[in-house]
Image: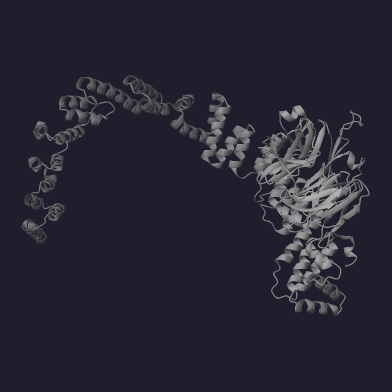
Amino acid sequence: MDCYTANWNPLGDSAFYRKYELYSMDWDLKEELRDCLVAAAPYGGPIALLRNPWRKEKAASVRPVLDIYSASGMPLASLLWKSGPVVSLGWSAEEELLCVQEDGAVLVYGLHGDFRRHFSMGNEVLQNRVLDARIFHTEFGSGVAILTGAHRFTLSANVGDLKLRRMPEVPGLQSAPSCWTALCQDRVAHVLLAVGPDLYLLDHAACSAVTPPGLAPGVSSFLQMAVSFTYRHLALFTDTGYIWMGTASLKEKLCEFNCNIRAPPKQMVWCSRPRSKERAVVVAWERRLMVVGDASESIQFVLDEDSYLVPELDGVRIFSRSTHEFLHEVPAASEEIFKIASMAPGALLLEAQKEYEKESQKADEYLREIQELGQLTQAVQQCIEAAGHEHQPDMQKSLLRAASFGKCFLDRFPPNSFVHMCQDLRVLNAVRDYHIGIPLTYSQYKQLTIQVLLDRLVLRRLYPLAIQICEYLRLPEVQGVSRILAHWACYKVQQKDVSDEDVARAINQKLGDTPGVSYSDIAARAYGCGRTELAIKLLEYEPRSGEQVPLLLKMKRSKLALSKAIESGDTDLVFTVLLHLKNELNRGDFFMTLRNQPMALSLYRQFCKHQELETLKDLYNQDDNHQELGSFHIRASYAAEERIEGRVAALQTAADAFYKAKNEFAAKATEDQMRLLRLQRRLEDELGGQFLDLSLHDTVTTLILGGHNKRAEQLARDFRIPDKRLWWLKLTALADLEDWEELEKFSKSKKSPIGYLPFVEICMKQHNKYEAKKYASRVGPEQKVKALLLVGDVAQAADVAIEHRNEAELSLVLSHCTGATDGATADKIQRARAQAQKK
């Protein structure tokens, strides 16, 4: 244990800091870091170097080289810089490299040097040029702050949703500030700058002078400032050698330290651990590194070569040409276990496990001591937690073995924390490997989450490792393996040196029917890369037509999209394609396409019936469909035409079409309707009233009701209305008029073709029993009983039924015998039945 704590350095009485090597860098840099623009992404992210930037002593003809490395120094990309002079580099939260040029343009590159996009910071920045820039991170995304040659600030809090904000002018600012930085307070981005001994805070509305509380006197200039990783704390380095540390709001002072060095540092960053009360700042000069905090003494390291500091959530990464190290506060669990002469439960449990492996009885003594204090559960938890913060796998295993040993003596210790720690450490050790180069700590990993880590492995095209992690952690396929395979397929379609057939086959063999994978998304990526034929081949594997069709339309493969939509049986999808085709093709080609697809043609006709009648007529004309064309003109005559002449003309066109279709019945019926319309118009002119649009029967009835019986009879003869139908119409009309005298004359005009029972029924319907009895006597024998019953003459109906000896008529009369008055009639019928049975 004493040897293990040899690299621990105390800062005051309550905290230790240690620095250990992450990687031995093998990136073969030809220039010093000081001669490059450097940017390193947090959370073990990549490193970007712009070699040979624009300097006066360099030949103007030498183009700079932009190199991107992993944290272990493995090369990821290298490209010759062909754009304008670069002022600053920085990484976004999505690990995209932002290159801020002198003209205010920001070029965005991917991890492998692929150009993504660019944007401008505005015309003012373009005119005044960029003096300095900062890339910062907020809860909304990654932002860019610009200092222009006019000593004005412009910033955007989120480059993904670019909204430029021009900050207020600083009064009396004639030269560049000695130092400045971007802050994020209350979800708003600010700029803090130093001008001599004064500090100014710029927000979107005003410029405010601020004073750090408790600042040592005699300060004439601020040389450096640093914001903590969480943007909650601020450190200021003054020209007197004092380092002031406090809250980012400048309302509270945490501490102040005199480092006795007045030279401006190269870098100053915060070094703090989540949930720790200790606050420390790391300051770097050419060959010296100093850790200062709320203590009278500092920790100092000698830098053998030019180094660069990268602030992290729980420490600081320090890399140089040869090494990459991590400096951080020793976690509480590790300190409890490993500090000299520690009697913490975790320390005793670790010693007990080591003695157990030696088969020593001391293991039992240590274990009994822990159990007597009732701290065995705490000891196991300490060992598990400490294992998470260790970088070396051997020490991780030692602590986890101790935790496993202690668990054996606990009855109900929940295993989740132990199992999850084993899983997390296996994942962390895998990504920390030199060839992967993502030196995440346990705290960073938990803050980043497994999903983001998988995304970063995908960005590095480490698909096999990402899939192995998903399978090991048993993540749901949609969140894990399926998502990664989809990313792999999207990368695969970008390999233009492989044929479309081979790429499509390889993707299908690998993906198959994996749930959560959308072939349409992969095809869209292929189309975006200019590989249309590959996109079509990939869409053949997409089972959802609703996903196939939109992309096919986008690729101008409308006819294929129509076939797919028809195969799906989704009418809405077919309508979508049809409307797209209509706008894309000329009228003739569109109609020819429809003729080859009967289902599409039928659906389009249905659409035209409700939306585009003229187009429907053109379709019928093109197909020589005279039957439907005739029906179309009939509907049009009533729907569109109000004048009688136009309606008749439309009907005439319809009749001609029916004749061409050899449908004589429809043609004759149409001609009859034309005759009827002309007659109705004439009737309106001569008689007044409303006749147009009435049916033939209603026209006859209206004439009868108006007292124009001769005209009604003439109309019936003209249109060959059968006598039976005419009698029914006249009977009904006269009864409605209650013109009983005319009805009687009509009944005697000749023998009724419909008999006289209808006269009885109509009269009874009008509640005229008197008139009904007149016609009851004239009803034929077969309907006599029914007529008599209708007028209420039950006795006479019984006599007729008995006379006819008709059982059905007898039963009908019996059903009408109700009450005492009909009792004799019922007896009479029963006697008649009895006699009939005897015979």
Q: Position of residue 482 (x, y in %)?
A: 69, 50
Q: In this view of the protein, can residue 507 be seen by the observer?
A: no
Q: Image check: 321 left or right of 722?
A: right
Q: Position of residue 781 (x, y in %)?
A: 11, 45
The structure's colour scheme is one colour
Q: Is residue 43 above or below residue 128?
A: below
Towards the viewer: 790 or 555: 555
Q: In this view of the protein, can residue 340 be seen by the observer?
A: yes
Quarter-wise, where is residue 419 in the image? Answer: bottom right
Q: Position of residue 207 (x, y in %)?
A: 70, 38
Q: Is residue 399 above or below residue 38?
A: below
Towards the viewer: 174 or 537: 174
Say which quadrant the N terminus sits in.
bottom right
Quarter-wise, where is residue 111 in the image? Answer: top right
Q: Image check: 587 left or right of 799?
A: right
Towards the viewer: 194 or 186: 194
The residue lying at 79 percent from left, 77 percent from top is 367
Q: Residue furthest right?
A: 304
Q: Position of residue 423 (x, y in %)?
A: 75, 61
